[in-house]
Amino acid sequence: MPIRSDYHVHSSFSGDSDAPMEAVIRTAAGMGLEWLCFTEHMDFDYPVSEDTPEGLFEVDTKAYHEKFRTIRSAREDLPHLLYGIELGLQAHLAPRQASYVSANPFDFIIGSSHLCHGKDPYAASFWEGRDAEEACREYFSSIIENLLSFTDFDVYGHLDYVIRYAPDKDKDYCYEKYRDLFDKIIDLLLEKGLGLEVNTGGLRYGLGELHPCSEILKRYRRLGGDIVTVGSDAHRPEDLCRGFDLAEAVMKDCGFTHYTVFSCRTPHFIKL
Ligand SMILES: [Zn+2]
Ligand SMILES: [Zn+2]
């Protein structure tokens, strides 16, 4: 049975998408999806630049929730439509993240690292003046700091996202190179009862593997981890569920027997 959920989806409520929610839902229903979770961007304290005007990645939560409720009550051809958020984590934002999460009735929360110590790996300046390994180490270390400061979310999103923007992308990237950091991250995820997201979005950036790479998934599974959601990170309806055949094969190969969906912040497990 193919994967019938997409748990990482953006619509025009995210600053980098112009997809109407209705169009996303229509496409998902047409594909026979049973579970669809919107996860709009909420990144506090995003550095302002020419490409990123102030507040670009801060969803208008009230408008998003109102629209979502209206749409959910009107749609009957998609069995499970969920209200989620992709929260950009940084350790210094922990108190703000905590109050935002407790003030909103999300079904599902992805914690993601889009920024690292206030810097954006998307910008060339993140990589300049040092080798890629040093920059990646700073990024993965910041994930540890994030996990030590705030854990009120459900899965860590696209764990090795930084590789998308490395000068040589994933050419020299492997789990072994950062094993000390990844093992610490996985230990913390397990200790806090958090899951991992299998994110297929990196395939659209020319990466050869999913986020995170299969060695990370394998280790998480081997140590008892069983919470894995699957997300396309679609910003356009046509990208929904892209790469899910590969995700299914990789997850099975890593020893997973189920994938996870959430409602009201509670995990449910569906057989792969
Ligand atoms: Zn993201
Ligand atoms: Zn996203």
Image: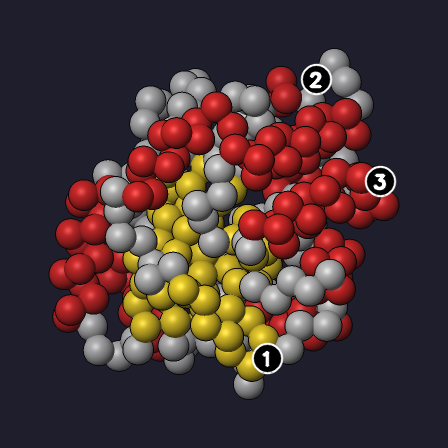
Residue farthest to the bottom, as pictured: 1
Image quadrant in which the N terminus is located: bottom right
Instruction: Name the residue that disc number 3 marks.
Output: 177
Q: Is residue 252 above or below residue 44?
A: below
Q: Are marks 1 and 3 in contact (CB under 8 Å)?
A: no
Q: Is residue 204 left or right of residue 7?
A: right
Residue farthest to the top, as pictured: 129
Q: Nearer the viewer, mark 1 or mark 2?
A: 1
Residue in view at x 45 percent, y 67 percent: 267
Q: CA distance from mark 1 to mark 3?
A: 30 Å
Percent x, y of residue 126 = 63, 21
Residue in view at x 55 percent, y 54 percent: 194
Q: Nearer the viewer, mark 2 or mark 3?
A: 3
Under mark 2, the amino acid is Glu
Picture quadrant where residue 82 is located: bottom left
* Between discs 2 and 3, the one toward the N terminus: 2
Under mark 1, the amino acid is Leu
Secondary element type, mark 2: loop
Q: Nearer the viewer, residue 78 or 196?
A: 196
Instruction: Name the residue that disc number 2 marks.
Output: 128
Secondary element type, mark 1: loop
